[in-house]
Amino acid sequence: MKLEDARDAYYDFSKNLSDINRKLAFSGIALIWLFREVSQGKPLLPRGLRIPTILLVSALGLDFLQYIWATAAWGRFSRTKEKDKEKEFHVPVWINWPTLAFFWSKIGTMALAYLSLLRYLFKLV
């Protein structure tokens, strides 16, 4: 196997994981919407669904921040190299650290959200 093949596999899996994570967030929000209560014409969340809701929305927020950082960092970096007319260059290791932090944070947050959601659902049984 070549390094390029390993990187391609990593990129494919991380892209798919991000897509699945996003779908899980929207599915969780939809499920929570089904369990909402209505009081005086206003929707209310049961107490046990507040934490999962916060976590699901946070996971979407972290997803958004991941792509904001990656777009800004790589856009700025490539523009700087373009102005310097450099064709080949080394990329600083730190450029992907925030992206990876957001990536793994959103995955962990989603796991906590679904654990909280499952805990709520098992209490109903």
Image (cartoon, rainbow, N blue to C red):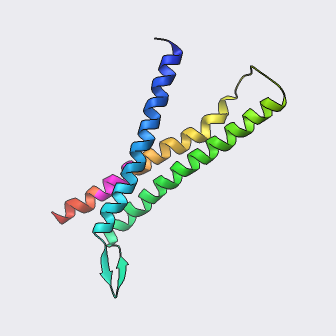
**Residue 74, quarter of the rendered image:** top right
Q: In this rendering, is residue 111 above or below 45?
A: above
Residue at 38 percent of width and 67 percent of height? 50
Report the residue that reaches farthest toward the left.
125
Q: Position of residue 82 (x, y in %)?
A: 79, 30
Q: In this rendering, is residue 7 above or below 1?
A: below
Q: Quadrant of the C terminus?
A: bottom left
Q: Quadrant of the N terminus?
A: top left
Residue at 48 percent of width and 57 percent of height? 58
Q: Position of residue 75 (x, y in %)?
A: 70, 39
Residue at 68 percent of width and 40 percent of height? 73
Comparing 22 with 117, the one in front is: 22
Please tell me whether residue 113 belongs to the stretch shown in magenta.
Answer: yes
Q: Position of residue 78 (x, y in %)?
A: 73, 33
The overriding secondary structure of the stretch rendered in magenta is helix
Q: Position of residue 30 (x, y in %)?
A: 34, 61
Count how many numbered circles sit on residues in the image.
0
Residue at 58 percent of width and 50 percent of height? 65
Q: In this rendering, is residue 111 above or below 116?
A: above
The segment highlighted magenta reads 111-117
Is residue 98 left or right of 111 when viewed as pictured?
A: right
Is residue 21 left or right of 62 when viewed as pictured?
A: left
Is residue 1 left or right of 40 when viewed as pictured?
A: right
Q: In this rendering, is residue 77 above or below 102?
A: above
Report the residue that reaches farthest toward the bottom.
40
**Residue 88, quarter of the rendered image:** top right
Report the residue that reaches farthest toward the right.
84
Please tell me whether residue 122 belongs to the stretch shown in magenta.
Answer: no
Is residue 9 left or right of 80 when viewed as pictured?
A: left
